[in-house]
Image: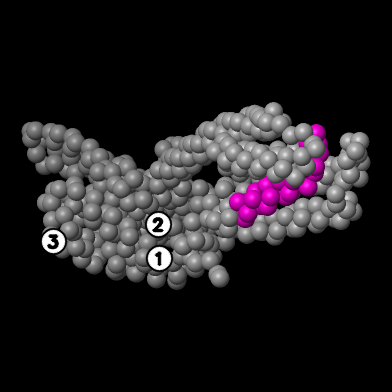
Amino acid sequence: MRPTTREATTTDPDEVGRLRATATVLRHMRLAALVVGLLQFWLYQPPPGLEVPFSRPLAATAFVASLLAINGASWWTARSRRPTRLRLAAAAETLADSALALGVVWLFSFDPHSDLWALLIIPVLEAALRARLAGALAAWAALSLGYALRDAWAASTYPDVGFGVDGVTYVAGVIGIVAVTVGLLTRELDRRTLQQQQARSEAEHRAAELAEARQLLAHRAYHDTLTDLPKRDLLLHRLQRELAAGEPAALLFLDLDGLKQVNDAHGHAAGDELLINLARRLEGTVRAGDLVARIGGDELTVLLPAPTTEDEASAAASRLVHVVGEAVALDSVGQMVRVSASLGVALSGAGREDPEQLLAAADAAMYHAKRTGGDQWVLAPTPTAADGERGDPPSPSGQAHRHQEHAEHGQHPEDGADQRGRRRWRDPGEQRQREAEGAAADREAQHPHAAPDLPRPQRWPSRPVHRPAGQLGAQQDPDADGGPLDDRWQPHR
């Protein structure tokens, strides 16, 4: 009969292992008893005047065959993985060993001084190992009763041989001491084993909790708590790995237009729900190997790993702008809201070998898309060797260096073109200052007694924009008044 699914699933590996180990120990014990029994059969010398009433070779053969049969059955049943079958086999083996020991003792019942009663200890030890103290006491009671009946039968069968109660009590007492001692030892061993198992289980449970806590901390260290998207550090790590491969990769920098209005109108809980929904929507839109990350409050990035072409990056940007622009159902307010996205695209390459450079280029392109109306995407121009001369706003140190260089040659930064006809960068602040000075001089010439114009307060950017030197082209400061934009920055919808 095949075991049912329920029986197979309720198998206790620890109990099966214990039953198998006990059966192995008892098989070795039977082999030792076999050797002792053979020696007793061949070396036994009856007292003077007594004769052995059986054939020693036949008895020895039956004894050996019985022990080998029990050991063979024990080995066969130990292959089972079902505790119920193993327990039934253990009980049958104990009964068989008890019957064999009593049979040998009854066989030598003609000699009251025979020491073969010691074979009765084997079933007691077996019962103690299998059923602990209760089993040892039960085996002791059954074997003591069997030995007493043997002495009573021998007294009636061999009236010339003296049998007394003292022999029965002696044997029963010795077997009882063995039964109680081994039973208590096995019970104490079980108790300590159980404590060790509980301690091990608790240690494993704590180790599992600690490992889970470490994984959670590591996950939270690199993932956003609200959207569960990767953070900036994980994005930069992935960017570093992609750029080290040498293949072209693309970074899409996305800013949500209208998130603040949602927060103001419906509360920050609605804004959080909107961010979560958009994060899941973006993850479902990009490819399996792409990485969607959140690096700011309303700023998200999408990394398109290498190799990625400009056409693939452009198609992904158009798709993301369209997906973000679709309405989102907010369960917290029971309304549909709609936001848009300003998205910048930057491709890796010369001048963008560093993750921060690529991120800054995508950020600048995104800000250009936001400044020119939003709900569109802009591809950052590919940096070239001449970008340093044709309009990239340099760092403060670069400005100082350029201003000094032009001063040494008697030139000014606002000169229209050099001998090669390339556009030069114009400092917006210096240009406005010169225009303001010229306008003031004209007004003073026309109205010499008019009050002088007060200086206009300086306008500060609404958000920090990282624009490393030699990367953005000829785009002017977004907060500057007037001035043409570089024609390399073309918005797309």
Colour treatment of the image: one colour
Helix, strand or loop: magenta stretch:
helix
* Contact between labelled residues 2 and 1, with CB atoms less than 8 Å apart: yes
At mark 3, the secondary structure is strand
Q: Quadrant of the rendered structure where residue 245 is?
A: bottom right
Q: Do the residues labelled 2 and 3 touch (CB within 8 Å)?
A: no
Q: In the current view of this chain or complex, which residue is farthest to the front?
A: 159
* Residue type for callout 1: Val
Indicate which disc, 2 or 3, sits on the residue closer to the N terminus.
2
Region rendered in magenta: 89-116
Q: Which residue is drawn at 17% across and 61% down?
A: 337
Disc 3 residue type? Gln
Front residue of 101/131: it is: 101
Q: Can residue 212 be seen in this view?
A: yes
Residue located beneath label 1 in the image: 286
What residue did someone put label 2 on?
292
Q: Residue at x 54, y 56 (%)?
A: 84
